[in-house]
Amino acid sequence: METLPAEDPASVHLQPGDQLKVYSRWDSDSDSAPGSSVMSASATDRESNPPSSAGSNTESGSEWSSSTNDLRRLTSRRRRSQSRMTMVKTLALIHLALVWSREALTLSDLLRLVKEGHIPYVNAYEELPEEMKLFGKDALLFSVLSIPSHNTLHREAQALVQFLQLPAFPPISRQTLLHPALLSLRFLTDANLPDELHRWVCRLMDRAGMADPRGFTINPQSHGILPRYEVQTAALIIVTMKLIFGLDDHTEWELSNQVSSQDDSDDQFNLRRWYRLMQAALIRAQKKADQDVARKQWRTKKPIFLSKGEKNLIMKRKRNAEQVQMCFEKLSSCPAGVQDISPSSFRFCWGDKDGSDGPSLHHMKVDRVLTQKLGTLTPQNSLYWHPALKSCSTLRKCRSHYSEVEATLPRSFVWLLQLFSFILDVKPYYLYEEVLEVERKVFGAKHAMYPKGKKKKRRTETRTGTSSRVVQKSGGKS
């Protein structure tokens, strides 16, 4: 399983003193994902002018005036509906409050608490006192049929920051648990990676210019963007793994063979062993998550009646749902209701205790994959591959090219994306975009995605801190 075929990667030569020399060798026809390209359509419905069939100029003018007034009323009504509070906006407001108080609860943690039922959301009105009865439009506020995604909730929170015109948030410094310097420790622990990788994550963070607290602090005057703290931290860890182990479907296994062939390698980190351990744990965790979703009771115990006429129909549907639920309980090996689980920020549990996902590798060392060069400890891997880093033109309105380029990416890299996507409960393309953002900050966005004119194979050489040159060849492998 480890020796999957890999595409010919682009390369980076790591020089002592943090001087990075980058080679990018990719066919420009393959679509790599652009940066900051998550775009969505408006959630409001489109409006159209009502048709006007006039018999005279007077009637035509009056009907046009009437349709214009109708449009104005519809526009004002839509503005009022957008300013009304919804369940999604409630979650977004909670997230902003957690960021303001600098709590160690990320947006992924908040959504996981909602999905596990620790925070009432889908049937939140069932927790209301008996004297609070909901009818009509007020009841529609609590009519929730799905849980929003990470991207949707982050977009809503960003809109609330602008709508509420909030002042500058308290600074997110290195000592704050939301900062990648400390948040990376948590994700390294959850992924069962060695603790020694933390200093390499911090070095990469400094190299990318992501250690400045101003980049993680919301300030409408200078930096009004709401950071995706956990996604950025996971992207830093993935880029660090690429720097040290290659993740090109060849280098990582050669390094693993090198570690295994040496004596006294029991305390040395072996990527092959870690992969096998994590793959088994990931399959079990994904299966359990799918079962929990299938057994989750989405139907409410107290239906909402918008009118008395709907009561009979809703009660009939409820009885049918209960009968199907009883049949499911008889066929399944476990009760249909989701078992109560204590809240946790970790997806996996590592150690020797009963119920753990496997032995802990946190104490392992990475000395065998490092070497001394001019008195500086550097990775033995001297090559770094990456897709094209230049963002698409804003006129293209691209969302993500991950689905198109995924087949050309090394399988070990795709698997690592899937692992951290499961930990964060986000889509792989969402994390892939952030990985490209980190690589742009480290190496620069000088590798064109779509060159003008005829598409050609490109080979771009970039040295950090110096100018770049581009060599184009019309055919063959560059």
Image (cartoon, grey):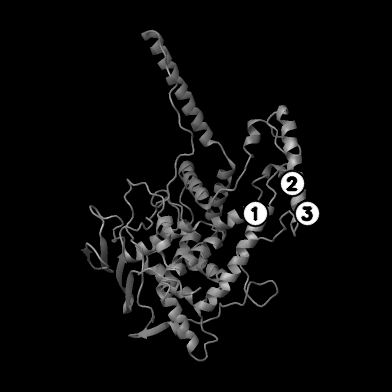
Query: Residue at position x 51%, y 63% from top?
Result: 418
Which numbered dot is residue 191? none
Foreground of the two, 261 or 89: 261
Q: Quadrant of residue 142?
A: top right
Q: Quadrant of residue 435?
A: bottom left
Question: Image check: 164 left or right of 334?
Answer: left
Secondary structure at numbered mark 2: helix
Q: Where does the C terminus fall, quadrant-wise?
A: bottom left
Q: Upstream in the sequence, badge 3 or badge 1?
A: 1
Where residue 455 appears, x then y in whole percent? Answer: 26, 56
Foreground of the two, 254 or 439: 254
Rate crowding at label 3 as few (under 14), some (14 to 19) or many (20 or more) other CA atoms within 10 Å: few
Give the mark count. 3
Label 3 vs label 1, nearer the camera = 3
- What amino acid type should be assigned to the residue bearing mark 2? Val
Where residue 343 appears, x then y in whole percent? Answer: 66, 60
Which numbered dot is residue 330? 3
Q: Upstream in the sequence, badge 3 or badge 2?
A: 2
In 3D space, how far apart are the residues under numbered discs 3 and 2 (Cα atoms)? 10 Å
Foreground of the two, 266 or 235: 266
Say whether residue 171 is visible: no
Q: Relative to residue 310, is residue 119 depicted above or below?
A: below
Q: Quadrant of residue 186?
A: bottom right
**Residue position for label 2:** 324
Foreground of the two, 471 or 380: 471
Q: Upstream in the sequence, badge 2 or badge 1?
A: 1
- What amino acid type should be assigned to the residue bearing mark 3? Lys
Q: Relative to residue 75, is residue 156 depicted above or below?
A: below
Which numbered dot is residue 293? 1
Label 2 vs label 1, nearer the camera = 2
Secondary structure at numbered mark 3: helix
